[in-house]
Image (cartoon, rainbow, N blue to C red):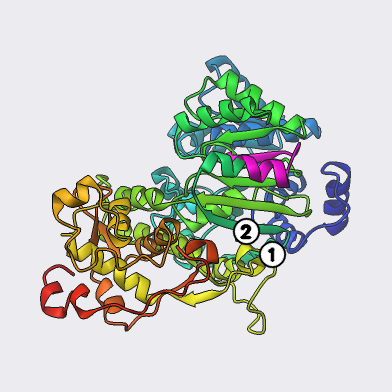
Amino acid sequence: MTAQAQTLLKEIFGYNEFRGQQAEIISHVVNGNSCLVLMPTGGGKSLCYQIPALLRKGVGIVVSPLIALMENQVAVLRERSVRAAYLNSTLTPGATAAIEQGMLAGDYDLVYVAPERLLTPRFHILLQRIPIALFAIDEAHCVSQWGHDFRPEYGKLSILPRKFPQIPRIALTASADAKTRADILRCLDLHRARTFTSSFDRPNLCYRITARSNGRMQLLDFIRNQHPGEAGIIYCQSRKKVEETATWLNANHVPALAYHAGMETVVRTRHQKKFLQQEDIVMVATSAFGLGIDKPDIRFVAHLDLPKSIESYYQETGRAGRDGLPADAWMVYGPSDIIRLRYQVESDTEPVSIPIRQAAAARLNALLALCETTACRRIQLLEYFDEPSDSAISACGNCDACLTTTPVQDATIAAQKALSCVYRTGQNFGMEYLIDVLIGKRTDRIRQWGHDHVSTFGIGRELSVEGWRIVFRHLLALGYFTTGEERFTLQLAPAARSVLRGEIRIKLRLSPCHYAISHQPISTDLSASSMPDSRETRSGI
């Protein structure tokens, strides 16, 4: 088998050597065994089922969650003279019937289908009439309610071992924490199957996460200074922002295309093809773009909005630098992102259980902790996926946290001032208003509310407005604030009490530019009158 697989690898896929565990996985599946494969984006997961499908008798059935994903992979396989097809809702009844007849005639080595189609009785009847090489469940994290991209139809794929007990199954994903992995094994009845886990580390990626001031200008500076004339992907949360950002980049002489699910299929397809073929195109997209995109020379992935979880972030950033050359994972974010995502989790109207809602909140908290960390981002990212780092290594040397020269300092006093100001002003105002109170700015609104007479008025003059934004963003991200009935008003969370009491120390990177007077240290003068005591806060915190 090894010689045959090696021949296919070189002659069809153009690679001289297998990477990591690819050869072992392929041998395992070719011999008729099932498995779960955890491999990072760009690690070569598709070869782990494509080569066994070519070596085993019959057709390989690949379960794929997105139309764009299956269409792209089939197009690439056909260019390599692999007999592949897809069955999805974009096909006419005549085209669907022709492919089904081709399956019966043995004309295909790989057929990609959505889980909804695979589960229909009609398709089961078709499968019973043909030899099947294997079932590949791609993006297997979709099976888990604990995962970041749950698809209910995936949960029904446990029918496969009952209907086709002799057919090997290979489930694959690039992003799943320990709980999601356990759920994949349970839901797909893979308890006795072997699990192959590759390292989640992408050492060629430099992770950079920074506070948003002017997101578009920060993005433009990043592209012009770091990646002029190079291919990249920019992710935005809304379709409107995708289109506006692409238009703005083109107006600033950066060739950009838009991609989102609301566009006409022919336009999306044209944009995707152009992106894959040209070296200098930037694709601005929602999360609908990227799965299975086989473009090795993407030099950067940028986020103008926070994704929902570390899994999403990891999967999306992993599309950069698949050729192994240096690439950037760059992201800007601000308090509005944190408030938006917390609001989405807390106000979700879907009929889900409390544990599932708590799991979503935990995933968000882990992402925010990654954004706010003052330690190595790569190590924290790997620890999230339960990949222990070398205890002797505390810095990767290739993320902004490791590369910065700004020292970490104790900002507990500043944090206490911010929390106290929220309390003294009635827990009913937004961040910018609270900063004005802290720096002693006598605006008409502050006078109207009488907050120029509260004990926290003017006690934060040592920090600049931007410095205070960093403090508030950090406290909000780590759950020391909650939002009021109006989304952008801040209230104290129960955890705030520990900071106010000094039981938890707050560490931040604050450079000289974040002080009102350069190099002035944070004031330690926090009078008792400005601090809410335990009796005052008992009902509010």
The picture quadrant where one finds residue 110 is: top right
Residue type, label 1: Asn
Residue 394 % position (x, y): 63, 78
Q: Is residue 25 left or right of residue 160?
A: right
Of the numbered discs in the image, which one, if any, rests on residue 207?
2
The quarter in which the N terminus is drawn is bottom right
Determine contact: label 1, label 2, CB under 8 Å: yes
C-alpha gap between disc 1 and disc 2: 7 Å
- The answer to which of 239 and 294 lies nearer the viewer is 239
The residue shown at (28%, 78%) is: 498
Q: Is residue 280 above or below residue 211?
A: above
Q: Is residue 533 left or right of residue 232?
A: left
- The answer to which of 110 and 20 lies nearer the viewer is 20
Q: How many marks?
A: 2
The residue shown at (52%, 50%) is: 332
Instruction: Find numbered disc 2 in the image and state the secondary structure of the residue it sits on.
Output: strand
Q: Is residue 82 magenta?
A: no
The residue shown at (77%, 34%) is: 279
Residue 517 % position (x, y): 48, 65
The quarter in which the C terminus is drawn is bottom left
Q: Residues within 10 Å of mark 2 (few under 14, many from 20)?
A: many
The span shown in magenta is 220-234
Among numbered discs 1 and 2, the one appearing first in the sequence: 2
The picture quadrant where one finds residue 505 is: bottom left
The residue under label 1 is 398
Residue 71 % position (x, y): 63, 31
- The answer to which of 239 and 147 lies nearer the viewer is 239
Q: Is residue 242 above or below residue 364?
A: above
The residue shown at (47%, 25%) is: 262
Residue type, label 2: Tyr
